[in-house]
Image: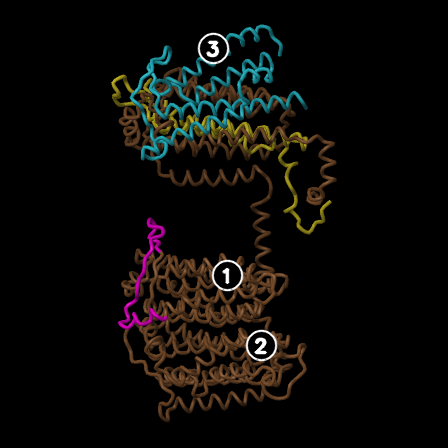
Chain colours: A cyan, B brown, C yellow
């Protein structure tokens, strides 16, 4: 798949998709979006890039292999429940510090523990989809 | 109580380690455990004088009402003392008997496990705990009988004992559950309060039958008696402990424990009495023809258990007293005789009574112990056995004519037992010394210490009956019959019918002893009758019925056709749904085209057409595209009806699915039409029926008023969770633990895909690997 | 719309069931996929449809009924993603199976060991 049109498209839309996925993630608590959707959109961006330039090259753009994203995501989600335990509440109870960070695209952001949980979901979904697609395609290239 | 259980189970855990370091000397340390428990409960005896049980509760599974609750009454204490007391001697004995055995540590581990289970069983107040301990004794008995696991007979005997006792255990569990459902409690004390209610309930008959099955299997009552002689494949300490003094009496214990609750009816009295008498006769008749020391003893144990059951069935205070006294006596002499048999076996390497004689010259102390125990078994004064036998006759004679009938049967059975006692306990030590495989010497100290102590106790209690009558027997009798009775034991009652019967028993027993060769011959000629006995039924079930039922059901259910598995699952589900919804009534106007918008009809039509085409086409990519149409349409439906999150997710996942399907499927061959026309038609009809059932289900659910409690809760509480997208708040806050589980599953499935697809051996390397490694190759053949 | 959807869901179930009963493994997998979508739609419909009304609070944190039931939506959302995971795993298994055996006919894959236990292995 060496279509020039696809390559040009991918160069432009893939970064946009990553940004879009982050926006969807951050605003997910108030508007449609969230970790699942964000992770899927981000993975779709990488996959589009992979179709244009090959999966190997697409994955090289990432700082970590997909399986590490799964691990980071799961750990992040699991650890986001610890502060509640420390505060004497049931595991995974949402805690909200009295803070509000204005962001440009996703409205005001409150950095509570559910946000980190959602980030964990985002990373693990992202890693899952990429790992699945990566193994399915790698196999195809080396019969 | 809990503390002593803990100590015993701890001993079970550390005994292999102790044996590893100390070898045989470990037995002296381990014997301290039951000894200390014995002393502890001796102390408890003083606190029981008013007769009310001591209760001790530890909460275990609070929500189910299952507590570790202990009930220390006279009955429990009698058993506790027997278990701990004889246990002490057995632990010592086993250390010497199995000295140098490579698995001595394992033996102690299981033995202490059994001891703990038995202690817990007799002291349990809660029925569930009682059941658990009950099964634990069966399990540890299985391990102990099969201790010599290299021998085929030992394994078969262990399995037989396990299956028979487990069958009873299951019956017992059902009985306990019925009791609990009738009384809303698992606590024996609370259940006891509703005695009348239980006895008037129609399920009382079933209850009694189930309890009897449990008790009879455990206590080897006819027709389940056959497992006990088989269990003699166990090492002798096990036979002496489990199969004479403790585990087999668990059934008797259960009957005694439940007598205040279930007893007093004709059903209870007659079934216990008749089965007890039958067992007593079966055991004693089968015993006399045997020649193996342990089998002789095992059959008389069966007879003794039958006697106890029968006495409990008679149900009078006197009979209960006789039963308890006999239980105590029997445990003492039978444990002693088994240990003697083991010592003789240990010293001569034979257990065949025909090869034994004159051993008193070589093993005098063992001979004294054996003789005393045999006297107790015969019921000769002044041993406690005599008193208990008198009591048994007295209890029977209370019943007039039928009592005389029982007594005469009892005389015959007891005479046979007397003959066996002479064969086992006296004969090998007297007479001319015979040549044995090993030249005998006096057994080491632990081997004669145990039997001697037990036999001397029997003598002591017989000479000074007050030692036991007020302290041990009376509280136990009170626990069984429920009220206080006078317990008076004495050697001399005056010249009574009982004395005559005792005398006749001894005389007849001596005659039977002289006729022992004839009995052996008779046994050999009657051996073919075994084919009609319960044991051959057991082996028939195990060897023929079970395998054929298993292979039949495997052939029917495990046929290997995926679609028929799916078919049976879904057909069952569809039938269940249809049956549940059979009374649905829809309003007459439930379906009119006018109530739908044109685009709604369009969406549904798209799904219809795409699905229909997808099942007809054989092209892989075509069907993938058609399924894609369905998926995107569903995503549109989500978007139109208030679920933008779902629509987005469905859209994205659908896209990724399509990519994945195309990547994998286009490497596979075209789907051929493999099925015949007839099976297609059948499948189509079944699918239609299933779809119809589902449609009904949805329609029905739409006509049930929607419960808004949950959505209201989530909507009202979302502001607390600082989010306005309620779906997302549920995912990451309210039900975050679920989500955590789900992303974990997701991650695992990704790793699974990676593992399945990445570790593919090349054809050549796999061939060489299977050559190097023989196991996969042999598996293929 | 609910009644129409009820029929549609029944049809999806019927289609997927028919696919599940086929001998070709490819069709079975497509049946699994379709089945999952039918289940999602069933839960969605059974919870009641609320056209144009999601489960989003207003800025002041209030929401007037009727609104969509958010709980089934949350369940379905995860079900969709999990379904993807299951499908990917099934596909990987099938891919591997096809590599090892060269067939996708389920009847050819069937082990005959239970048919006749006395028959000596070839």
Most foreground residue, B175 or A140: A140
Instruction: Identify the mark at residue B443; answer none if there is no mark.
Output: 2
Q: Secondary structure at mark 2?
A: loop
| B735 left or right, relative to B194 | right
Q: Are marks 3 and 1 in contact (CB under 8 Å)?
A: no
Does the segment drawn in magenta span residue B45?
yes
Q: Secondary structure at mark 1?
A: helix
Q: Quadrant of residue C56?
A: top left
Is residue A82 positioned above or below B535 on the image? Answer: above
Q: Are marks 2 and 3 in contact (CB under 8 Å)?
A: no
Work out how far the residue at label 2 is from the one at label 3, CA to CA, in angstroms. Answer: 92 Å
- The x and y percentages for residue B16 are 54, 58
Please tell me if label 3 and label 1 are on a single chain. Answer: no
Instruction: Identify the mark at residue B277; answer none if there is no mark.
Output: none
Q: Residues within 10 Å of mark 3 (few under 14, many from 20)?
A: some
| B623 left or right, relative to B9 | right
Please name the residue that numbered disc 3 is placed on: A16
Q: Chain of mark 3?
A: A
Work out how far the residue at label 1 is from the one at label 2, CA to CA, in angstroms. Answer: 28 Å
Does the segment drawn in magenta span residue B689?
no
Q: Residues within 10 Å of mark 2 (few under 14, many from 20)?
A: many
Foreground disc of the pair 2, 3: 2
| B163 left or right, relative to A102 | right
Most foreground residue, B679 or B537: B537
Q: Residue at x 58, y 51 (%)?
A: B552
Q: Earlier in the sequence, mark 1 or mark 2?
A: 1
Q: Chain of mark 2?
A: B
**Quarter of the image that includes the N terminus of chain C:** top left
Q: Residues within 10 Å of mark 1 (few under 14, many from 20)?
A: many
Instruction: Identify the mark at residue B140; answer none if there is no mark.
Output: 1
Start-end of magenta stretch: B42-67
Is residue B397 positioned above or below B124 on the image? Answer: below
């Amino acid at each position: 798949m060496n279509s020039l049109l696809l390559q040009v498209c991918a160069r432009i839309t893939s970064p946009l998709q990553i940004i879009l996925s982050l926006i969807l993630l951050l605003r997910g608590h108030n508007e449609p979006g969230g970790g699942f959707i964000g992770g899927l959109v981000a993975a779709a961006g990488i996959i589009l890039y992979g179709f244009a330039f090959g999966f190997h090259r697409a994955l090289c753009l990432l700082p970590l292999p997909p399986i590490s994203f799964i691990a980071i995501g799961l750990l992040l989600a699991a650890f986001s429940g610890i502060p509640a335990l420390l505060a004497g509440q049931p595991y995974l109870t949402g805690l909200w510090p009295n803070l509000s960070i204005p962001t440009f695209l996703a409205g005001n952001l409150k950095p509570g523990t559910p946000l980190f949980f959602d980030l964990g979901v985002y990373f693990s979904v992202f890693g899952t989809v990429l790992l699945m697609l990566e193994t399915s395609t790698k196999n195809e290239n080396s019969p | 109580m809990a503390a002593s259980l803990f100590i015993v189970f701890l001993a079970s855990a550390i005994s292999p380690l102790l044996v590893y370091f100390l070898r045989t000397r470990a037995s002296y340390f381990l014997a301290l455990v039951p000894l200390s428990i014995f002393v502890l409960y001796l102390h408890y005896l003083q606190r029981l004088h008013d007769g009310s049980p001591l209760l001790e509760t530890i909460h275990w599974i609070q929500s189910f009402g299952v507590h570790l609750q202990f009930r220390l009454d006279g009955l429990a204490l009698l058993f506790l003392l027997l278990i701990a007391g004889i246990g002490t001697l057995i632990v010592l004995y086993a250390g010497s008997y199995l000295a140098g055995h490579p698995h001595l540590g394992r033996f102690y581990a299981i033995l202490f496990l059994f001891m703990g289970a038995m202690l817990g069983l007799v002291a349990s107040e809660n029925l569930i705990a009682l059941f658990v301990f009950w099964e634990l004794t069966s399990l540890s008995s299985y391990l102990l009988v099969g201790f010599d696991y290299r021998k085929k007979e030992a394994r078969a005997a262990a399995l037989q004992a396990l299956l028979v006792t487990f069958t009873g255990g299951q019956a017992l569990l059902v009985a306990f559950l019925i009791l609990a459902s009738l009384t809303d409690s698992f606590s024996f004390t609370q259940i006891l309060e509703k005695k009348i209610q239980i006895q008037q309930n129609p399920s009382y008959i079933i209850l009694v039958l189930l309890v009897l099955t449990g008790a009879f299997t455990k206590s080897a009552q006819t027709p389940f008696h056959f497992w006990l002689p088989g269990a003699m494949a166990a090492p002798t300490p096990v036979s002496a402990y489990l199969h004479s003094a403790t585990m087999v009496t668990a059934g008797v214990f259960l009957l005694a424990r439940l007598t205040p609750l279930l007893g007093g009816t004709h059903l209870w009295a007659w079934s216990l009495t008749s089965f007890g008498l039958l067992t007593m006769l079966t055991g004693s008749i089968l015993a006399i023809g045997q020649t193996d020391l342990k089998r002789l003893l095992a059959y008389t144990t069966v007879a003794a258990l039958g006697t106890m059951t029968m006495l409990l069935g008679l149900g009078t205070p006197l009979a209960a007293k006789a039963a308890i006294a006999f239980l105590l006596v029997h445990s003492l002499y039978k444990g002693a005789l088994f240990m003697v048999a083991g010592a003789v076996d240990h010293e001569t390497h034979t257990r065949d009574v025909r090869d034994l004689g004159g051993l008193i010259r070589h093993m005098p102390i063992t001979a004294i112990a054996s003789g005393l125990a045999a006297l107790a078994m015969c019921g000769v004064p002044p041993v406690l056995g005599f008193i208990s036998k008198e009591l048994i006759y007295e209890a029977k004679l209370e019943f007039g004519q039928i009592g005389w009938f029982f007594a005469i049967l009892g005389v015959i059975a007891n005479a046979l037992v007397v003959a066996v006692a002479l064969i086992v306990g006296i004969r090998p030590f007297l007479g001319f010394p015979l040549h044995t495989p090993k030249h005998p010497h006096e057994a080491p100290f632990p081997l004669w210490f145990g039997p001697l102590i037990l036999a001397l106790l029997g003598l002591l209690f017989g000479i000074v009956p007050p030692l036991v009558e007020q302290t041990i027997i009376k509280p136990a009798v009170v626990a069984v019959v429920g009220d206080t009775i006078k317990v008076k034991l004495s050697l001399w009652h005056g010249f009574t019918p009982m004395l005559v019967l005792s005398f006749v028993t001894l005389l007849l027993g001596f005659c039977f002893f002289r006729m022992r060769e004839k009995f052996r011959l008779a046994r050999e000629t009657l051996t073919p009758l075994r084919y009609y006995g319960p044991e051959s039924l057991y082996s028939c079930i195990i060897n023929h019925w079970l395998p054929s039922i298993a292979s039949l059901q495997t052939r029917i259910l495990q046929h290997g056709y995926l679609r028929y598995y799916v078919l049976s699952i879904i057909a069952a589900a569809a039938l269940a749904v249809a049956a549940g919804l059979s009374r649905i009534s829809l309003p007459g106007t439930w379906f009119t085209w006018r109530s739908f918008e044109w685009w709604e009809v369009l969406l549904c039509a798209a799904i219809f057409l795409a699905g229909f085409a997808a099942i007809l086409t054989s092209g892989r990519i075509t069907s993938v595209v058609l399924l894609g149409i369905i998926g995107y349409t569903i995503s549109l439906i989500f978007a139109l009806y208030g679920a933008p999150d779902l629509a987005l997710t469905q859209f994205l996942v659908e896209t990724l699915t399509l990519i994945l399907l195309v990547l994998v499927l286009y490497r596979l061959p075209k789907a051929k039409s493999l099925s015949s026309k007839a099976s297609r038609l059948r499948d189509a009809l079944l699918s239609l029926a299933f779809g119809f059932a589902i449609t009904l289900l949805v329609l029905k659910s739409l006509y049930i008023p929607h419960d808004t409690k949950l959505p209201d809760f989530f909507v009202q509480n979302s502001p607390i969770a600082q989010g306005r997208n309620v779906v997302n708040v549920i995912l990451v806050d309210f039900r975050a633990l679920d989500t955590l589980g789900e992303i974990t599953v997701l991650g695992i499935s990704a790793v699974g895909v990676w593992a399945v697809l990445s570790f593919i051996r090349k054809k050549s390397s796999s061939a060489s690997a299977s050559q190097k490694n023989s196991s996969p190759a042999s598996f293929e053949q | 719309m609910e009644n129409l959807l009820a029929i549609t869901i029944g049809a999806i179930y019927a289609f997927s069931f028919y696919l599940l009963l086929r001998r070709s493994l490819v069709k079975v997998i497509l049946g699994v996929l379709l089945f999952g979508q039918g289940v999602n739609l069933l839960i969605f419909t059974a919870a009641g449809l609320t056209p144009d009304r999601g489960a989003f609070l207003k800025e002041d944190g209030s929401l007037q009924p009727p609104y969509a039931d958010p709980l089934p939506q949350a369940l379905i959302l995860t079900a969709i993603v999990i379904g993807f995971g299951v499908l990917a795993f099934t596909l990987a298994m099938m891919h591997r199976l096809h590599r090892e055996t060269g067939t996708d006919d389920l009847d050819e894959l069937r082990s005959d060991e239970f048919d006749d236990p006395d028959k000596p292995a070839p």
